[in-house]
Amino acid sequence: MNKRITIDPITRLEGHGKIEIFLDDKGDVDRAFLQIPELRGFEQFAVGRPAEEMPRITPRICGVCPTAHHMASTKALDDLFHVEPPPAGKMIRELIYNAFQFEDHTLHFFFLGGPDFVVGPQAPAAERNILGVIGKVGLEAGKKVIRARREARDIINYLGGKVIHPVCGLPGGVSKGLDEEHRIQFLETSKFTVEFAQFALQIFDDIVLKNKEYVDVVVGDAYKIITYYMGLVDENNKVNFYEGDIRVVDPEGKEFVKFKPREYLNHVAEHVEPWTYIKFPFLKNVGWKGFVEGKESGVYRVAPLARLNTSDGMATPLAQEHYEKMYETLGGKPVHNTLAFHWARLIEALQAAESMVKLLENKDITDPKIRNIPTETPDEGVGVVEAPRGTLFHHYKTDEKGIITEANLIVATVNNAAAINMSIEKAAKTFIKGGNVSEGLLNMAEMAFRPYDPCHACGTHALPGDMPLIINIYDKNKDFVKQLKR
Amino acid sequence: MEAKMSKEKPKVAFYWCSSCGGCEESIVDLAEDILDVVEAIDIVFWPVALDFKKKDVEAMEDGSIAVSFINGAIRLSEQEEMVKLLRKKSQLVVAHGSCSHLGGIPGLGNFWNKETIFNRAYHTTPSTDNPDGTVPLEKVEVEGKELTLPSFYDTVYTLDQVIDVDYYLPGCAPPPDLILNAVKAILEGKLPPKGSVLSPNKSLCEDCERNETKPEKLAIQEIKRPWEVEIDPEKCFLAQGIICMGPATRTGCGERCIEANMPCRGCFGPTDQVYDQGAKFLSALASILDTDDEKEIEKIVDTIIDPAGTFYRFSLPYSILRRRKMEAVK
C-alpha cells in the first residue's frame, strides 16, 4: 500500500516549507520532496528602479541575512559604476560584514543547530531549545549569548543605520565613517567576540567531540552526501566572506574550477521543477542529472562546510588551528558529512571575530575618506559575497542613466536547495523502513536540513518552544491513518 | 514550557505572510526585554518558533486569541486563508511592519503581474536553464505523486485589504521600542482608538535633527542621486537636492537611515492626515521648490528618476494607485 507522509509545516526555511514523503509498496521511502511555496519576484520588480536603490531594496529578500544582500548589491554597484571604495570605505564594509557573519553564525549554533548536540540528539524534545542549552552550559553562558548577539548587531546598527536592512552601501564606498571613540568601543566588542567564538568551540569540543555517540552521528552515513562544493577564496585560497574568486572543488576535493564573479554564468545554471517555487542551481559544466550524488551530478553545496572544503585554510591564525583539527578528526578533506556544517560554522565565526579585531586595530579605518564618487557610465555589474548560508550572486544591467534593465539573483540558500532535498530524502530512507514510521523520524528529518541553516533559520528560536513538526500519514486513498506530533 | 504558563495570560499569535523574516528578527531584537514579554503572555501560534498546525488554530474558540501580530503582504492563497482564520479567532489584529501595513517592498510587485514575474523568474533570467519551459504549478503529478502549491496572485494586497485590522505597527522592520510599547499597551488595556498607527502622528522632518537646515524654499535646479554627490552629514537632504521622503513619512523610527547619512525612503508610511504618500510627497516637493513657474517645476520634477518606485517604495498596494494596469505594460 502506497503511503504519503506530510511534514507541514517545517519551519525556519526561507518562507514556509513542506516535506512530502512517499512510501513504496514495501513501506520504504520512494521519494521525498521539500516544497517551498513562496515567490516574491524581486528580479522582475527591480526593473525600472535606480541601481543605487538596490542595496536598499534587495535586503528585503531576507530579514535574517539582509546584510549579505546589502553587501552583494553594493559590490555589484562598484562593478556596475566601475569604481572601488577607498581603503577606509572597504574596511568599514568588511567590519560590518564580519560582525554580521559572527552574530549570525553563533546565533545559529546556540539557538538552532546547537540544541541537537548541546542538549543531545536523544534528549526530550522539550529540552532541545535555547533553554535546554542554557540549562546545560549555565546561565552565565546564556547571558553571554544574548550579549554577543546584541553587541555585534550594535556595530551594524551604528554603521549601517539599521541592523535589519542596513542602508550605508553606495557605489565606491559607504555613507558613514567610523570615529576614534567608536573604533575603541567596537574593538572591545570584537575582542569579546573572539573570546566568545572560542568559548563556543570549547562547548562543541566538550559536548560533541568528547562523546563517541555524538561523533558517530556526525560521521554516520545517514547524514552524508557526496557533492561538489563552492565558496569564495582570497588570493591564497583562504576563506574570505567579502571578496575573492569563486572556487569549486570536486567530490574528491580537487579544484574543479576557479572563476571571477563576472564569469558566473559560464559555470552556474538553475533548473526548474514544477512542484516548488524554488529553483535548483547546478554546475553547468557537469550538468543537471537530477537529485543525485557524486561526480557525474552537477549538484554542489555552499555555506560553512563547503567554504572550508573549497579553501586551503582559514585567513586567521586561531581559526586555522581549528580548521586543521576538524579535518584531522573527520578524516581529511573534503568532508561530506552534513552535520559537520555545525563545526565549520563555529570555525568561521572565529575567523569573523579575529578579522574584526584586525580591522579595528588599524587606525586607518577612521580615515574620513570613505567614498569615491563614480565618474564612469554604468552598464553591468556582478557582486558576490559569502552569505552565512552560502555564495550569493547579484547581477544587474542598467541603461546609461543607471536604471535597472535586468536583474538576476542566486540567493545563498537556493544553491543548497537540491542538496537539502537529497539530505532529507536520505535521512528519511535511513529511518523509515517497512512502513515503520517511528517517532524518531521527527528528530532525524529535522536534523537533516538544520545544518544548512535554511534562510528563515532565524533567531526566533530564542523563545522557548520546540521545533514544530507534525507528520501526517495517509494511505493511498488519502485517508488519514496516523499523526505524529510534538 | 506551555505547562508553566497560566491560563489567564493573554494568548498571542504571530504569523508571517509575504515577508522576509525581518519582523521576526525585530521581535528577537527586544533582546533581554523579550524574557519579560514571554513571561507575560501565552504564545499560542508562531510558525517560526512554536509547535502549530492550521487545524490547531481552527479548533480554538472564536475570539480566544487576545491579539494576532501579522507581518507580510498578501500574495498567496494560503496567506489569505490563514489571516482570515486568525481574524476569526482573534479579538485584535495588529498589522506588524511595512508589508502588512502598506504592502512594503514586495508590493513593488504591483508594477507587474503573475505572468511577468513567472516569466522572469523561470524563463528569462540568464542563469535559468529551462529548455522544457517548466513552471511551478498549483497541482502537479511527479512520478504518479500529486504535489500542490498555493496559488500566486496577480496583485499584492495589504493586510487590511483582506481582513479587518485594529492597529498598525509601522516600519521595515519596526524598531524594538515601538513593538515593546505596543505590547505593553495591549497588556495594560491602554489602547488607542481602533485603526491607529502605533507611532507618533507627525512627519519625520519634525523629529529630524537636520530639520533646522531645511530651507523654506529650495533653490535647486535639479535632483541629485545619492551616489552622485558627497552627502553633507549635517544638512537636510532636500536642501542638498537629494530626494528624502521625510516630509511625507510618519516619524517614530528614530531616524535610523538619516543617522547613517542616507535619505528616508518612507517605510513608516504617511501620517493620519494623508492617504496617499506619493501624492503627498509630490505636493510637498512642489511647494518647497523656489519657483512658481509651473514649467520650471515640471522641469525639475522631470529630473527625478523613477518617481513611482521612489515615492511609493513601500506603499504602492496601499496607495490610490494600488497597482499598474497591465494593459499598459503590454
Image (cartoon, coloured by chain):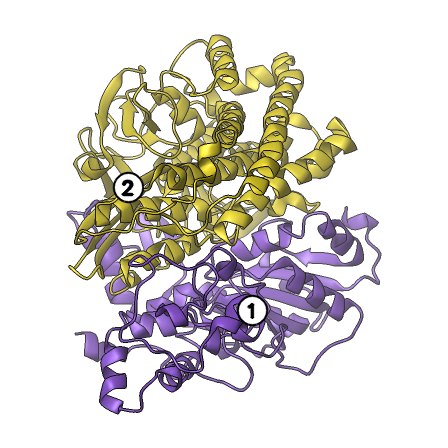
Chain colours: A yellow, B purple
Q: Residues within 10 Å of mark 1 (few under 14, many from 20)?
A: many
Q: Chain of mark 1?
A: B
Callout 2, which amino acid? Glu
Which percent across, then down, holds residue B77? 43, 67
Instruction: Decide: is A258 above or below B217.
Output: above
Question: In the structure shown, which secondary structural element does the residue marked by tag 1 occupy?
Answer: loop
Which percent across, then down, holds residue B289? 35, 82
Please tell me whether mark 2 or mark 1 is closer to you in this view. Answer: 2
Which residue is at the front of the view, B113 or A192? A192
- The CA span between labels 2 and 1 is 36 Å
Whether residues under marks 2 and 1 lie with C-beta atoms below 8 angstroms apart, the answer is no
Query: Which residue shows up at 47% across the image and 67% down it?
Result: B73
Q: Quadrant of the C terminus of chain B?
A: bottom left
* Residue indicated by mark 2: A84
Q: Is residue A59 visible?
A: yes
Callout 1, which amino acid? Pro
